Amino acid sequence: MDALKKRILEDGKVLSGNVLKVDSFLNHRIDTEFVLEIGREFKKIFSDCEINKILTIEASGIAVSFATAQSFNFCPVVFAKKGAASNMGNDVYHASLYSYTRRADFEIYVSKSYLTKGDKVLIIDDFLANGEALNALIKICEQADCELVGCGVVIEKAMQKGGEMIREKGIRVEALARIYSMDAEKGIEFC
Amino acid sequence: MDALKKRILEDGKVLSGNVLKVDSFLNHRIDTEFVLEIGREFKKIFSDCEINKILTIEASGIAVSFATAQSFNFCPVVFAKKGAASNMGNDVYHASLYSYTRRADFEIYVSKSYLTKGDKVLIIDDFLANGEALNALIKICEQADCELVGCGVVIEKAMQKGGEMIREKGIRVEALARIYSMDAEKGIEFC
């Protein structure tokens, strides 16, 4: 997606530790119109697929998923929760993941009521790097015995192994921008 | 908002400890079309106001805010983060709050880059009960010296004191459904 690559080059900041900061438009300050455009792009890419539910993870995945759902006939979005809230009950799917940004392990939860056999699910997230979040969401889809149509991520850091590992399982993964390399001084190079 | 009250009566569940569970459409599984309707309702209510930014808190406030932003000329949404991520930097506003759902204290953060003097801000959240989240967001608006136009919440538990306390400060608070009382056996009564 050319507009996304342009935006990353204009507004993204490469920090130490392989961190790409795009929080001016994607995951802290949300550029509403641009994120809706991202949603329409996912629809184009997965236009051959029947999808009745979008699965994501709080918090950064929610806006992109909501935008994408609008392009998929206003299908529902289910977001996995980090940590169990007191009102979730015990009837949940769960999986664990490590967040490099927050440097902590999380357990994520999805209520069994909201993901079921027969669902045709598109997983959406903002970033794919080591694949921790996607892998946890994929595990939850497996527990729910639903049909995983594919994974759509806004930005893939292709120099990290997450995308490769997930694609090797035979799961379709589409990224709107794939980063080949990035460096605070040399800048960002796309695949 | 009659459609919301109807939906709460149909799908909401009253749990012990004054918890109203509406996660089938609002904050775990998101009914995209219905949440967009909620966004349009906020636009109607605040149609007399000039607003150029929506401020909310992760994670449950994001979808409603994103929907509302679409009705306010696609203005940006800024969401406060719970806990400091390693890529946030130190140039942040912050405030603390207690979450009754998660039974824990949180510090929330907003980057100073994304909320500034001159911004006309509408705060949006899913619930108002004790006012912990709204009060923290209001403190952040004060730190940023921006103009707080008002607060819009989807559901106010009017039997708890948050709304009253905030309105007493002279801040406009609008709720789409105000609950007068609720009980697992007797059900829900609106104001």
Image (cartoon, coloured by chain):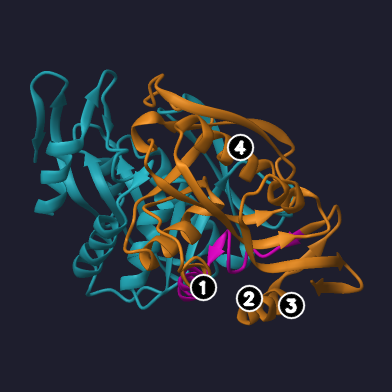
Chain colours: A orange, B cyan
Please rate how many residues cluster around mark 1, counting C-alpha atoms within 10 Å: few if below 14, some from 14 to 19, many from 20.
some
N-terminal-most mark, 3 or 1: 3
Three-letter code, disc 3: Leu
Residue B55's spot in the image, x, y percent?
Answer: 44, 59
Between the C-alphas of marks 3 and 1, the distance is 19 Å
> Under tag 1, what secondary structure?
helix
Please rate how many residues cluster around mark 3, counting C-alpha atoms within 10 Å: few if below 14, some from 14 to 19, many from 20.
some
N-terminal-most mark, 3 or 2: 2
Between circles 4 and 2, the one closer to the viewer is 4
> Under tag 3, what secondary structure?
helix
Q: Is residue B177 left or right of residue A154?
A: left
Is the residue A29 above or below the residue A162 in the image? Answer: below
Residue A181's spot in the image, x, y percent?
Answer: 85, 66
N-terminal-most mark, 3 or 4: 3
The segment highlighted magenta reads A20-41
Residue under circle 2?
A4
Q: Residue at x 29, y 39 (%)?
A: B24
Between circles 2 and 1, the one closer to the viewer is 1
Residue under circle 3?
A9
Residue A25 painted magenta: yes
On residue A41, the disc is: 1
Three-letter code, disc 1: Glu
N-terminal-most mark, 4 or 2: 2
Instruction: Specify whether disc 3 shares its chain with disc 4.
Output: yes
Q: Residue at x 34, y 56 (%)?
A: A75
